[in-house]
Each structure stands twice: as structure tokens, then as C-alpha cells.
Image (spheres, rainbow, N blue to C red):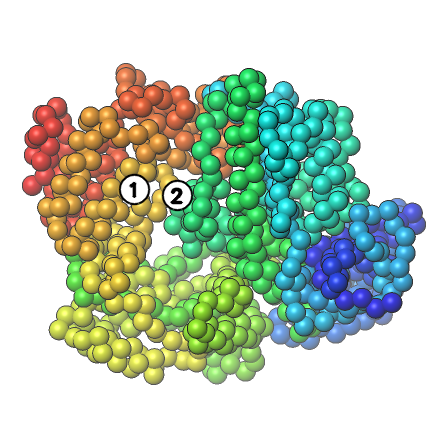
Amino acid sequence: MKIKFYPYDVDYTIDNDGKAIIRIFGRTEDGKKICAIDKSFEPYFYVEPDKNVQSAQHQVEQLKQDDSFVTKTKIVKKKYLGEEITLIQVFTNAPQAVPKLKELADDLPNIINKFETDILFARRYLIDKNIIPTTLCIIEGEEIKEDYHVDVVIEIKSIKNDASKPFETPKILAFDIETYTKPGSYSNTRYDPIISLAVYGKNYKKVITWKKFDTEDLDYLFVQNETELIQKFAQIINTYMPDYITGYFTDGFDFPYIRDRAKKLNITWDIGADKSAVNFSKHGIKESRIHGIAHLDLTRFIRIIMGDTLEIDSYSLDNVSKELLGDQKLEMDFNKIAAAWDTGMGIKEICDYNLHDAELTYKLCEKILPTISEIVQLVGQPIHDVCRMTFGQIIEWYLIRKSITQKEVIPNKPIFSEIAGRKENTYQGAYVFEPKPGLYENIVVFDFRSLYPTLIISHNIDKSTLTTIQENSFVTPEIEDDGFKKQFCFTKKKIGFIPEVLKEIILKRNEIKKEIKNLQKKDVILEAKSYALKIIANSAYGMFGFFGARWYSVECAAAITAWGREYVQKTAKSAQEENFGFIGGDTDSIILTLQDKTKNDALNFMKKINKTLPEMMELELEDFYKRGIFVAKKGDKKGAKKKYALINEKEILKIKGFETVRRDWSKLARKLQKEVLKILLLENNPNKAKDYVIETINKLKHKEIQVEDIVIKTQLRKDISKYESIGPHVKVAQRMKQKGIPVNTGAVIEYVVTSGKGTIGNRARLPEECQEKDYDTNYYINNQIIPAVQMIFDAINLNIKELTQEKGQSKLDQFFN
């Protein structure tokens, strides 16, 4: 039988004979959930022999350790760093045999190198078969019987990629749990039960709880106890048969909490499509994997991949929902949850809060799924993995996929000693100008479109093109390295693997951007395609310089930044020669004032520069700005790099480097700073800005500011036991730990500095421990308010004097000249 289906999850099992069997889970065109099984695929790796190929092949075929052995070998030709080499493809009896036999191959006299020993078996299958998750594929095979939570199981005879269309209608189920929470503490899996669990899907919503309240609404499901609640959730999953289960921080909280409670209650909790339990990673990043269902925890993707596009101070569900959906969580006082549950007087409110969280998560998943899916289709890996990838992993898997199609051998990941050596290598980064502090008008900003990717393409920067011969090569500007000057050369005789791949990406993205520009209304899919391509293109430079990357090359990284500095500096010099006022510049941009020039003059200057640039490189207009403010470095008169604010003709504010976009300042300080910037840039009214600051200080003095507006958030960068200098956030974290509240590296600690005696750390309290007027007014004036505007006022020659004594509210203007 022939079936078309959309694969989204792939893994493998080992049968009774020790053979690995690939399993692909997906949804057929007519809506059936399917598991396709392939018993024919074999694990393998490559070794590079010396000149005595036949002898090396014979040696490799004898490799054996315990139950691991070589099943067959094959001589193949591949390219490595642009040069063709001979390899022996070594097939093994099982995936777990690869690392064992690889180590044995180290001792063979005729083997000089090994490749592709660390490609996971299921991922290898997708790459070799060119099967792209979430994209249509065709299988031929026979239906077999398996006790799975799917509609059909097929043993594959043949499989091929169709790629005619993506998976547009996955069945998504969002979930969220609420746990019993005592006042002033966090839930603990040892004794705090799950009291409510909500699920939300298309035309489907339920919230399960084990305390009844009066309602005729069928959305509420009442069970007898926590055991039945967990079992009911499993039953819903098995009946609903989702393709994707989604949640917010479900890797770190919800799934581990359910696991621990199920274990305590002695419940078998098998929700996988193959009736297996959820798998939890034991090392590295926390991860909960469900066989046959893609678990999409949105937290990591939003924080890592989308973080730079969001103007939020934390990645809480509330903040992210407000930014992306224009919606937010319901109000809930967690100090009252225990009482509400114990008395039975607030069960409905808990359930409604729970269900709304699940609904927000579902809508967030719908919102960002097009972007995740586009990345999946580019890198060709399961959606579960892609939504947890870093930028480096995304570009790496894209290049791995491209390596297969271009018959390039995939470089090995570096071993520990290599990484240690790479960490010693440094190179000069991007050039950033120091602007003269001040308030400027009639500003124009130009930037080089995709500077680093286009530099790689136009100068053929690749490890395979690196040469010592200057003739017929691209030669870098002189590079300073430990007091010595050197240059790198990249041959023009052949096109490098990475420049070729990037050129394809840039051209494809340019076509998509043209399509978007010509559309009458927004196209979510096209914008997702463009963003996914941008991510891959912009990640290439970072990969060259990252010590853990397969395609690492410090020479390439240094060459990219050297040429970047040269082009930005040359453009800045040309602008000054044409009598534009020069303010400063960033990694890939220059900031000018028009002086007596017109906008048309600026555009003509841009065209003139573009005529001098090599292929693919282009200077483009970012925007014209009515006004901009540039500030000095802290404690210095020199301009601060990358710290400025601009307002364009549509009165849209662009802020770079200020505390308004950082979370380690209170909401009050950030709001104050943003408002002062708005007043100065929009109205050019220093006196009004000064009055606004005085008014804010007055409110602080009168204790009119709410506690939630003065909460400070600071992330723990390491284990609290390793801090030598104990700051307020560490003190609070220590007390949290003493209370039995789990505090891990990376946790964001929230605190308020209260009045009283002692150090700031001893007076720092959790927000829920504070009353409305407990906070230390002087601390917030001197450490939040004044620092938030000090540099801004210095740039326009307004001076803030420190508050040294109480002088009365009417004399606060004495702090300003």
C-alpha cells in the first residue's frame, strides 16, 4: 500500500535480535495518526585510510568488541575541505556499536582519521533519506499490528520525500498544571499535590480537579483524587492523539512535577504513542521527550531564538503573552491558593486561572509555529529538537544536511583537548565608534545589509579556501595579533562550501522579501520563511568563532571582522568627506547628521557607496530620525558604545543599550528612563523631563509607588555557593534555599530593598514578604532613579546633585541645575 503522510517525530528501538528499527510518527493526508517502521537502515561511520586502502579495509572489517562488530564496508569518495578524499564506510550491527568500534579504529596502523561518528542514528536516517519532518513524504509498505496509540502502523518498503507542501494542520494540545502552594514558599513534589490540570486544543478545552464546586459547565472535569487527575490526563492524551503537546516551561516544571507525583503515588504514567513513559534527560539541558508525540516547550525557543525581537524584561508567560498576543494571565494571589483549596472557597478561580494559562500557551504555539516549522524544513530535524536548538545548532544542522547533498564529509566535533586549545585563540572583534555625547537632530542611519554573511560570500571566506598565496586571492586588511600584524588569504580559484551555501540562502531570502513587499496584506508563512533564512545566514559568523563548532576557524572569524571594520570605517570617512556630520557607528552601521544636506543627498551618497562594493554587499537606509541622544560612558566623558536612543518621523522610539530593555532594573526606573527619553526626543523639552523625574521622586518619598513597580530582578549566573561577593539577589537566594525553595543556576531572583538597618543584602526581601510601604525610599532614589537618568541629563548638560539630606518635597528641584 502507498501512503502520503507528514512525519514529525523519529526514533528507533532495538528488537530481540539486537537490530535497530527506525520509527517515524506522523499524520496522514486524510488525518490518521501513523507509525512507519523501517528495518532496513544500518548505522555507519567513516574512516580515512592511508595509501594502503585494501589493507586498511581488511583491518576495519575485523573490528569487534563484545556484541559490537562490523557488518560490511564500502570504499567511497567524498570531499573534505574542498578536496576529494578516499574513505571507508564502516557499517555496524547496532547504533551503540559505532562509538565502541570508532575507539578500536584509533589503534589501526593504516587509519589516519575518522568521520561522522557522532551523528545520532535517527537523525542520520532523516539526513540520508532526505526526509524532512513536517513536510509530506510517500511510503510504500505493508500494514502490521502493533499495540500503539495510533491509527495505523506500516512497515516501510520504500520511502521518499514529496516536499510538495508542509504540515499545515497539526493536532496541538496545550497543558498546564497548578499545584498546592503554601504562603511564602514554592511547591515541593514530595508533599504538595497537583490540584488542577488544564488542557486546551482546537475546539477542545478541559480542566481537571479533585474538589467539586457548583457548575453545569462541562469544561470542568471532577475526579476523586490526585491519582485520578494524573490518570485522566493520560487518558485525554491517548484519546485525543495529539501530534504536538505544548506548554510553557514544561521541560523544567510541569512534566518533572507530574513524574515525581506519579512516582510517589505509584502510578504507571505511559502517554507515548508506543505506550511508553515520558523520557527525561539526565545531563545538560532539561528535556522531556514523548515517543510519537512532539513535545514543544516554547520557553527556550522564545528566549533564545526570538529574544532579540522582543522588548520584554523577562520571559514569563505573562510578559510574552502581552508582547505577542496582546493578552495576559489572570490575576492570582499565590499566597492564598492553599487557603482557597483547603476551604474549597476558590476552586473555580484556580481552575479558570489554570485553563487560561493553557489557552495562552496554545495561542502562543499557533503564533510562533510557522517560524519553528520553517526552521524544521531548513535543517531537516524533528520539531521537538528544533524548538530547543541554539543559533549555533541550527546553522550546524543546516550545513550537515547540505554536506550530504554536496558529498562533503561532515567535520568532527572537537574533543576536550581541542576545545581547550581553541579557547586560547582570540581575535579582534567588530569596530564600534565612540560617539560624542549630546542631543542631535536630523539624523540618518545606514547599515550594511547582512554584513557578515555577504562578506563571507563576496570574499569567499571558508576553511577550504584559506591559503598562504596572495596571488589570485582575497587578502584581508592587516590584523593585529599579540603585537604582530598579519593577513589571511582566501583563494578565488574555487568557491568555498559555506560561501556557496550562504549565497543560496541570501538570494532565496531576497526573493521572499520582494514577494512580501508586493503583497497587499501580511503573509505569516512568507515572513516565517524570511526570518528562518535570516537566522541561518546570520549564524555563520558566530559558528566560525565558536570553540565547540564543527566548522570552527579562528582565521575565518578574524577575517570577517577585519573586513567588516574596513568597510564601515571607509564608509564613515567617505561620509565626512562629503560633509555629512559623523556621530558614530555600530558593527554594521554608521550614524550621520544631515547638516545642510537633504534626504535626497543622503540617498545619493548610499548609491555612490554601493557602486564601490563587491557582489552581494549593499549599504541600505535604516531610517531618518528627527532626533537622537548619545550618552557618555559611566564615569567618563567619552561616548558610550552602543548606548543611544533615536526617534523617527513616525515617532517610533529606537532604544539601544539603555536600562529600559534590561530586567535588572526596577519597572519604575525603566519606565522613568523611557519617559525621559521620549520627552527629550519627541519634544526637546529638558525642563519637562526634569519635572517628570522630580514628580517620580516625590511619589517615592510619599510611598505612593506600588511594590510591584520597584521589584528588582537579577539572574543567578552560578551556584550560590560559588559567589565570593554576596549581592542582594544572592542573599535572597540563600534565604529561599533555607526555606526549601529550589534555587538553580540561571534562576531569576526577584527582590525589594526594604527600610531599616544593616546591609542592602540583609534588607532585600522577596516581593511577597513586603508590605506596600516597606521599601527604602533613599535606596531607590540613589540607586535606581538618579542612575537611570544621570547619563541622559549629563549629555544635555543638566546636572543631578546627590540627595544628601532631607530638604522637603518642595525643594526637590534643588537637585537640578
Q: Which residue is mark 2?
A: 313
* Nearer to us in this view, 136 or 545: 136
Q: Residue furthest right?
A: 17
Q: Residue 40 at x, y = what percent?
A: 86, 62
Q: Residue 53 at x, y = what percent?
A: 81, 70
Query: Which class describes the residues within 10 Å of circle 2: few (<14), some (14-19), or many (20+)?
Result: some
Locate the C terminus by quadrant: top left
* Nearer to us in this view, 636 or 186: 186
Residue 461 position (above or below residue 663): below
As shown in the figure, which amino acid type bears the numbered disc 2? Asp
Q: Residue 504 at x, y = what percent?
A: 55, 75
Residue 116 visible in image: no
Element type at mark 1: helix
- Residue at 31 percent across and 53 percent down: it is 656
Disc 1 to disc 2: CB gap under 8 Å: yes
Left or right, 35 with reference to 171: right
Element type at mark 2: loop
Q: Which residue is mark 1?
A: 670
- Residue at 43 percent across and 80 percent down: it is 615
